[in-house]
Image (cartoon, helix red, strand yellow):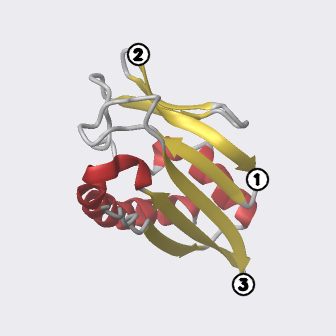
Amino acid sequence: MTKTIPIAPVRKSIDVKATPERAFRIFTAEMVRWWSKEYSINKSPIKDIVIEPRVNGRWFERGEDGSECQWGRVLAWEPPSRVLLAWEITPSFTYDPDLITELDIRFTAKGSGTRVEVEHRLDGYGAAAEDMFKIFDSGWPGLLESFAQEAA
């Protein structure tokens, strides 16, 4: 019998010069301000990124042509301390509602700022998890730096 060893999640964190409330708002309601435009799965360039602020809300990008491309959905909405998102994007970077990997973001007051911790759980990727780990492990640091600049 072959035993499958789950892949470790990608874990990244950053300290931002903002209150937890502001950091949460910039992360969730103003994602388009800091998300890299090159990380798009739509045919039209990104005009907006929307996280509907409720459990089961959609997480999607809206293109300049008005088209929408789903990324996932909200699994937990706990402002200003936590948002848990289902990342439903395949290794070929297409949306698949049957694929679920979890993106858990936590916001904790730290001094006059906030510690933001991101954990991207990759178990849903199966055999592709190791390759996806490398992609996300190298992508999240730049995204979090951009986020920190916007939050400040």
Q: Would you call the spot at circle 2 few (<14 residues within 10 Å), some (14-19), or many (20 or more)?
A: some
Amino acid on which the number 2 mark rests in the picture: Ser
Q: Would you call the spot at circle 3 few (<14 residues within 10 Å), some (14-19), or many (20 or more)?
A: few
On the image, the x and y values in percent for residue 42 come to: 32, 26
User: Looking at the picture, does residue 34 appear above or below residue 32?
Assistant: below
What is the secondary structure assignment of the residue under circle 2?
loop
Q: Earlier in the sequence, mark 2 or mark 3?
A: 2
On the image, the x and y values in percent for residue 36 come to: 35, 48
User: Looking at the picture, does residue 113 appear above or below residue 63?
Assistant: below
Amino acid on which the number 3 mark rests in the picture: Gly
What is the secondary structure assignment of the residue under circle 1?
loop
Between residues 110 and 118, which one lies in front from this camera angle?
Answer: 118
Which quarter of the image is occupied by the C terminus? bottom right
Q: Which residue is drawn at 76% across and 52% down?
A: 78
Q: Name the residue under label 3.
A: 111
What is the secondary structure assignment of the residue under circle 3?
loop
Q: Is residue 23 left or right of residue 40?
A: right
User: Looking at the picture, does residue 16 appear above or below residue 105?
Assistant: below
Q: Residue at x 47, y 32 (%)?
A: 48
On the image, the x and y values in percent for residue 60 come to: 49, 31
Q: Would you call the spot at circle 1 few (<14 residues within 10 Å), some (14-19), or many (20 or more)?
A: some
Foreground mark, 2 or 3? 2
Between residues 45 and 117, which one lies in front from this camera angle?
Answer: 117
Q: Which of marks 2 and 1 is nearer the N terminus?
A: 2
Q: Name the residue under label 1.
A: 79
Foreground mark, 3 or 1? 1
Amino acid on which the number 1 mark rests in the picture: Pro
Asked whether the residues under the numbered discs 3 and 1 touch, taking CB atoms below 8 Å apart as contact, a structural biologist would say no
As measured in the structure, the alpha-carbon distance from the residue carrying label 2 to the one carrying label 3 is 42 Å
As measured in the structure, the alpha-carbon distance from the residue carrying label 3 to the one carrying label 1 is 19 Å
Q: Mark 2 points at which residue?
A: 67
